[in-house]
Amino acid sequence: LTLICLTLSLAVAAAAAQDSSPAAMTLSGDPSVSPVEAPIAVPRAYRGIELGMSMEAVKAALALDGLFAYRGDPDVSLLPRPSETLIEVAGTSFIRRAFFQFHDDRLFVMILSLNEREIDHYSVFTSLSGKYGKPRVLSPSESVWLDDATRLTVERPLAIKYVDLAVFDELKAAGEAVRSYEDLLRADFLGDL
């Protein structure tokens, strides 16, 4: 039994010594020390359209990209909040529909609803995992890659979402502040009954 354990330990050490990938390297560069994975930045762009871009820049990019059937202003909608706008555009081939949401004229959410006749969940998940490592969250309904600035999600039914976390957190905090104020008004109203 001791000989088997020693043989397995030597085999693992030899395999680690041959692996020169960043995941097997440490800060000292010595692969025999426990590995430290370098953080991989989550992408903020798709085909030249990047979170933070102005609406005019996104419109121009959509008009030049054959993967989107962008028709111009008919694809643009105002949302209930005055500072938010949405571009909803049909896709071709792998993309069924795409949604680009803006806050104060800056893109903060991209949603690509994929055509499951052309591409499957496993292929998308495998490609993203190969590029960006294991997802931070993995469940039957979604896989999530995160860094300090961006959230990338693959969801079922098959969709890919890119979210600018700074804007999202700002809107979420503003929504919670409004809700807290409404809760106080409600409590005050009920107290007066």
Image (tube, rainbow, N blue to C red):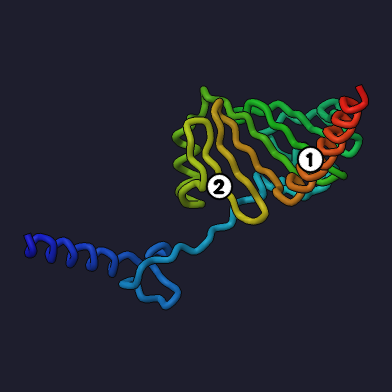
Of circles 1 and 2, the one toward us is: 1
Image point (41%, 62%), residue name = 23
Split into 4 quadrants, where in the image is the C terminus?
top right
* Quadrant containing the N terminus in the rendered view: bottom left
Q: Look at label 1 and name its amino acid.
A: Glu
Q: Nearer the viewer, residue 93 or 126?
A: 126
Q: Position of residue 114 (x, y in %)?
A: 59, 29
* Residue 111, label in figure: none
In the picture, residue 30 is in which quadrant?
A: bottom left
Place residue 75 in its image quadrant: top right
Determine crowd level at label 1: few under 14, some 14-19, many 20+ residues with C-alpha closer than 10 A: few
Q: Are marks 1 and 2 in contact (CB under 8 Å)?
A: no
The residue lying at 69 percent from left, 31 percent from top is: 98
Taking 154 as reference, is 134 left or right? left
| Numbered disc 2: secondary structure | strand
Residue 78 showing in the rendered view: no
Q: Earlier in the sequence, mark 1 or mark 2?
A: 2
The kind of secondary structure element at disc 1 is: helix
Q: Which residue is mark 1?
A: 176
Judge from the rendering whether residue 90 lies leftward or rightward of residue 128; answer left or right.
Answer: right
Q: Position of residue 34 (x, y in %)?
A: 36, 68
Residue lying at the far bottom in this picture: please name it.
28
In-image side of 191 versus 87 (left or right): right
**Based on the displayed image, in which of its 4 quarters is residue 79 positioned?**
top right
Mark on residue 145? 2
Estimate how packed mark 2 is, as few (under 14), some (14 to 19) or many (20 or more) residues with alpha carbons within 10 Å: many
Residue 60 on image: x %, y %: 80, 42
Q: Position of residue 84 (x, y in %)?
A: 85, 37
Image point (51%, 43%), residue name: 137
